[in-house]
Amino acid sequence: MKKTKTVPKEYSILIGGAAGQGSRMAGLVIAKIFNRMGYNIFIHEDYQSLIKGGHNFSQIRASSKKILSHKDEADFILALNEDTIKKHKEKLSKNGTIVFNQDKISFEGGVGVKIETIAKESGGLSIMSNTALIAAFAKIAGIDWRTLEDVLKKEITKGVEKNLEIAKKAYASVESLAKIEKIKNKPKPLLTGNEATALGAAKAGLENYFAYPMTPATGILHYLAGNARELNVAASQLENEISVINAGIGSAFAGKRTMVGTSGGGFALMTEGVSLAAMSETPILIVNSQRSGPATGVPTYGGQSDLLFSLSSGHGDLLRFVAAPGDAEESFYWAGKLLNMAWKYQSPAILLTDKDVSESTFSFDEKILNKVKKEKFSEWSGKGEYKRYLNKANGISPMAFPGQPGAIVKGTSYEHDEYGISTEETADIVKMQEKRLRKFEAMQNEIDKMKEAIEISGNLKSKKAVICWGSAKGAVKEAAEDLGFKVIRPIVIQPFPERQIYEALKGVSKIISIELNSTGQMEYVLNGCGIEADQRILKYDMRPFTAEELKIQLKKA
Amino acid sequence: MEKLDTNCPNTWCPGCGNFGALQAVKGAIEEMIASGTAKENIAVVTDIGCNSKIADYLNVNSFYGLHGRSIPVAEGMKLANPKLQTFVFLGDGAALDEGISHLIHSAKRNSDINVILLNNRVFALTTGQFTAVSPKGLKGKSTPEGSIEDPINPLEILMASNASFISRGYALKVQHLKKLIVESAKHKGFSFVEVLQPCVSFLNNMQFYNEKAYEAVNDDPSSKEKALKLIKEWDYDSEEKVPLGLFYKIQKPSYEELMNKVKTEKEADILECLQKHS
Ligand SMILES: Cc1ncc(C[n+]2csc(CCOP(=O)(O)OP(=O)(O)O)c2C)c(N)n1
Ligand code: SF4
Ligand SMILES: [Mg+2]
């Protein structure tokens, strides 16, 4: 017997304007109103690589269930500029409403509000017309004044009184057309993947962050710099990514947990540092937030085309941890986990995110907080003569740091003996290479045992399985769950959790691989384990998947 | 006396200027330790090149980095542990070709590291190609008819980059060089010691330096004007006299001092941050 599904309460709102008009901030305020009313939130940001003009929009989805992707269809379109209507009106749902800036746009249908006039007449700044739009929307959607007022008071830092005056006028100027109900849920923090990454690393003891600005990783630098005191982290912007990775390695060598962050092009510059970290056995966490490539690509849009590059980054025989989180909670968890593992194994670790994880906003479940802490690593006992590269059975030499009495600590990019003195002797070379190989084996063993290295969801008994990774999580899960497919998602990708994947594939007769790239990079990894996909769904217009479009394709599978 | 030697066999060519520099460095470290610096707080970062082998020859903390990248490693170390007395040893190829952006920015941000440039005016370890400071016309394997580029004056670049300590020594004037190194270590902020270092195998200018290098007297190292006059006396190409000594020194807060101001003893307060998000 089929269970009847309860239809979730759900709304999708698209707000758009030219860059500089503040549609993103306005979208966040709207999301916070829904959050306050108990809804789960997901926001997808679409913006261009320009500072003023162009067309930017946020797609906010609010639902009574947990959601990790946006919807194409919008129940409300909020237009600060004419482009918003022109470009998106086809996406308005059957009973949807367009609320627009009547001072700038003439449009038949929908509700026009003279938001600029209202702001001006109240003596407010022109940016405050956004407050008028938010308030008008709230009234139209049947959201009570108290909720709106509470959120505005919290979110607006300058000119609160003036904004409230404007909001009141706009609220009074329109009629309610709907009644969006409150849900009995505690509001959750709304976090982007970047913010969650910063917090997860901080929870695991991060003390220094180095970066050079690059979309979509820049948010981490901004967030850590803005919360330096709360998080006890120094966030340094250096002259280029080469400097960033080398300074990061210096900082870790001197004993501080360190992270660096960039996107594909900057990561390309960092790769000599990946190799240096591996040879010198210095723990470093590198965030590589993918955007579309090759080269400059489409800078503010997404994609998952740096997987193979990340997996093989750095010259020489080496192994790095690579993990790809699919939402904010996973960004938090894996940033912390990878920082700990980098220290445990004195190795480079790469948090491979992408634009749609890094810059999307998620409802963040605080239950994950307790799963991350600063974990122990192998420390020198302080007894006897110190050897930085002591030839231990598990390949992990205890760490001491410059400044520690009694130890001479010699780290190096050169092949070396146990003291860290350069060597060209065959016996020494083989000994150290084998020490590192034993460590790589230990890294593989750790992943083999790690349950959370992959996620299995959907219909666990289905013979049809979808394999996806990273930001595809949200849309794929939703589509596959609706259609009754199994979803297998490797989160750790190096060392590859082969054992868990084989286990998950038991009883599966059809594999569909879904990725946001044009060549099927995860498939290449699977092929390496003798796993072939029967079908592939690839998307490379640099926009994220939606569950709707995936369902259409998966129904054919 | 501290044991500053290691068991690593020295592979520099006999007569190499680096031997004089090593002697001066050891003397400086001994003096620093004698006057109270804990040995464990001395850290050396080296680059790649003949000069950088010094990491293997000094029994102190060291990090032997990548070519051109020693300066950022040292900056990271200093930020992580401000107690470290952090020396960088690198060649002209590293500092002025491969890694010149790091040199400029490190001076600009006044990172509290001591950069010792072992300047033989040639890529020595790769068998003698021209660098940014090679004399024009240098015949190397990559420029068999002589290099066609004019050299730059790195000390002028450092002045323009707002370096707070600029000096020059000569590898064969060991005592003078030692003093400069000790002084550079005492300086709070970015310090730069250029060491003229003859490479007997690829650019033996020992005789030239012996004749032309002289200890200049600078009665006011805080004067930019006076510093620039000394710095411009020799342009790395001519047969002019080559001044040595401390050219420029001013005091300003270091990068690490300012960056670490946000640090406290308490742990990261995640909940405080999360409050701003609901
Ligand atoms: C990224 C990189 N490029 C090139 C080299 C090859 N290389 C080794 S040493 C060196 C030049 C060193 O010149 P310099 O810094 O002046 O040091 P010297 O040998 O003269 O002391 C070069 C180019 C390298 N090791 N790494
Ligand atoms: S090649 Fe030149 S710099 Fe290198 S060791 Fe020989 S003399 Fe010294
Ligand atoms: Mg040189």
Image (cartoon, coloured by chain):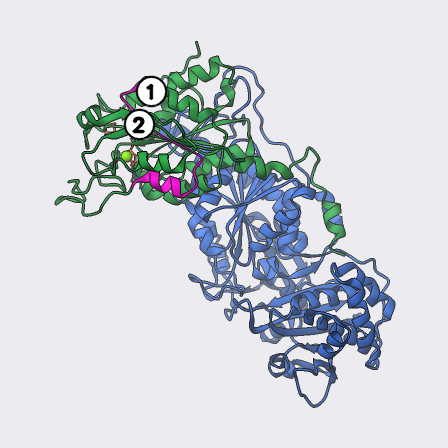
| Residue A7 in which image quadrant | bottom right
Q: Chain of mark 2?
A: B
Query: Measuring 27% from the left and 23% from the top, which residue is drawn there?
Result: B11
Magenta stretch holds residue B158: yes
Question: Which label's residue is closer to the chain start, 1 or 2?
Answer: 1
Magenta stretch holds residue A278: no
Q: How many marks?
A: 2
The residue where tag 1 is placed is B176
The amino acid type of the residue labelled 1 equals His
> Horizontal and vertical percent for residue B193?
37, 30
> Horizontal and vertical percent for residue A225?
61, 47
SS of the residue at dot 2? strand
Q: Is residue B61 above or below residue A497?
A: above
SS of the residue at dot 1? helix
Tell me the distance, in whole angstroms, between the alpha carbons under discs 1 and 2: 9 Å
Q: Which mark is residue A387?
A: none
First to last magenta residue range? B153-174
Residue contact at pointers 1 and 2, CB within 8 angstroms = yes
The colour one sees for chain A in the rendered image is blue
Question: Ligand 2 is found in which quarter of the picture?
Answer: top left
> Horizontal and vertical percent for residue A384?
53, 14
Rendered-image quadrant of the N terminus of chain B: top left
The residue where tag 2 is placed is B244
